[in-house]
Image: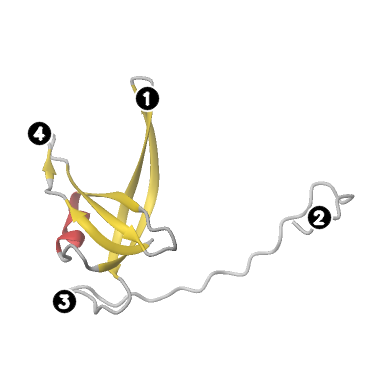
Amino acid sequence: MKGKIKKIFDQQDFPSGFYKRDFVITTEEQYPQDVKFTATKERTEQISKFNEGDAILVKFDIRGREYNGNFYVDLNAWRVEPGHGQSAPQDSPPVASTPLPDVPPMAAADDEDDLPF
């Protein structure tokens, strides 16, 4: 997801040794959205290289859980890179793009259906 950093929160340290840092980006869509991500453990260092207002690209996983009958969703940032028009931070290596493999189409379960998908 691409966007500009709107807010970087302070790092939260827990007695167990776990630590995390939340940040919010504003997307660059027709209808911009403010989206909160969480960087955990050593990934918090990635966000510390940026400032509010910087354009970034966030690669993330979606995590869900239940706690006391309530359900929660977290966007777990595992990679934060400079967005368009910015150079990479000083100590990050260039990222190589890997082409997607050719995947054969799935066989239709019902051959009588003439829908293209």
* Viewer-proximal residue among 1 and 62: 1
Secondary element at tag 3? loop
Name the residue that disc number 3 marks: 90
Name the residue beneath numbered marker 1. Answer: 70
Callout 3–callout 2 Cβ contact below 8 Å: no
The numbered mark, 1 or 2, whose residue comes first in the sequence reads 1
Residue at 13%, 34% (x, y): give it: 16
Q: Earlier in the sequence, mark 4 or mark 1?
A: 4
Quarter location, residue 67: top left
SS type, badge 2: loop
Up-down relation of residue 11 to residue 91 (above or below): above
Q: What's the CA distance linking mark 2 and mark 4?
A: 56 Å
Discs 2, 4 touching: Cβ within 8 Å: no
Q: Nearer the viewer, residue 27 or 64?
A: 27
Disc 3 packing (10 Å; few <14; some 14–19; many ≥20): few
> Which-is-in-front pick, marks 2 and 4?
2
Q: Amino acid at mark 3?
A: Gln
Q: Position of residue 28 (x, y in %)?
A: 38, 65
From the viewer's perspective, is 76 left or right of 108?
A: left
Query: Crowdedness of circle 1 by 10 Å Cα count: few (<14), some, many (20+)?
Result: few
Q: Residues within 10 Å of mark 4 (few under 14, many from 20)?
A: few
The amino acid marked with disc number 2 is: Leu
* Cβ–Cβ under 8 Å for marks 1 and 2: no
Label 3 near label 4: C-beta < 8 Å?
Answer: no
- What is the spatial separation of the Cα atoms under label 1 and label 2, in whole angstroms? 39 Å
Report, in whole angstroms, how far the alpha carbon at label 3 lies from the one at label 2: 51 Å
SS state under label 4: loop
- Checking the image for residue 115, the label placed there is 2
Give the number of the mark in front: 3 or 2.
2
Three-letter code, disc 4: Pro
Question: On the rendered image, what quadrant is the C terminus found in?
Answer: bottom right
Q: What colour scheme does the image use?
A: secondary structure
